[in-house]
Image (spheres, helix red, strand yellow):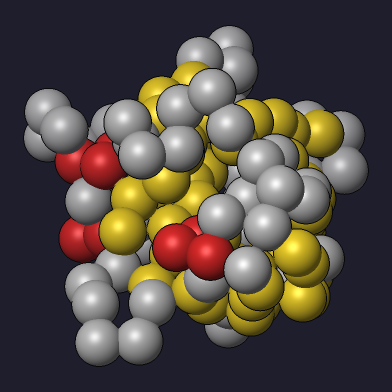
Amino acid sequence: QVKLVESGGGLVQAGGSLRLACVASGRTVGRYAMGWFRQAPGKEREFLASIIWNGGRTLYADSVKGRFTISRDYAENMVFLQMNSLIPEDTAVYYCADKKNPGWHGSARTSSGYDYWGQGTQVTVSS
């Protein structure tokens, strides 16, 4: 089992920034990638970014490319999401996720491609 705990959410004004963090514990050896998703009320969970654990190659959704940056601390078993130029539409619960294997093509962009999830952290952007 892998336990993921997110932190760093909160209330921010439009145009502001937040940095989310996710720490992993448990059976994390052999992980393939980690990702960030979000879910707004009444909407499906949305892929934001992923990072391959060994190598650091990143992938972003078009909706956040250029505003959000995913990074990792390999030694501390943590993944981060730096969010800049926030807009009210970014308001959602943000989740980190652990992906054990490469899976099928495109699986890094889908919630079903991930094996473990954190409990989420609320981000609210006021206008």
What quarter of the picture does the C terminus occupy? bottom right
When the figure is inspected, residue 39 is found, relative to residue 71, above or below; the finding is below
Q: Residue furthest right?
A: 76
Q: Residue at x 34, y 50 (%)?
A: 47
| Number of residue marks | 0
In-image side of 99 versus 107 (left or right)? right
Q: Is residue 46 above or below residue 53?
A: below
Which residue is the extreme one toward the left? 104
Relative image position of residue 39 (x, y in whole percent): 38, 73
Foreground residue, 56 or 81? 81
Choose top left, top right, bottom left or bottom right for residue 63: top left
Is residue 25 in sight in this rendering? no
- Residue 69 quadrant: top right
Q: Residue at x 68, y 57 (%)?
A: 14
In this rendering, position of residue 2 left or right of residue 107: right
**Does residue 85 lie above or below 14 as drawn?**
above
Residue furthest to the bottom: 42
Which residue is rendered at x = 66% and y = 73% of the image?
A: 126
Please give left or right for residue 106 compared with residue 58 in the image: left
* Quarter placement of the N terminus: bottom right
Q: Position of residue 90 (x, y in %)?
A: 50, 61
Task: Find residue 20 and report its image quarter.
Answer: bottom right
**Residue at 45% over, 37% down:** 64
Pinpoint residue 105: horizontal percent, then vertical percent.
12, 28
Nearer the observer, 63 or 99: 63
Tell me if I can see residue 42 in this picture. yes
The vertical placement of 101 against 52, above or below, is below
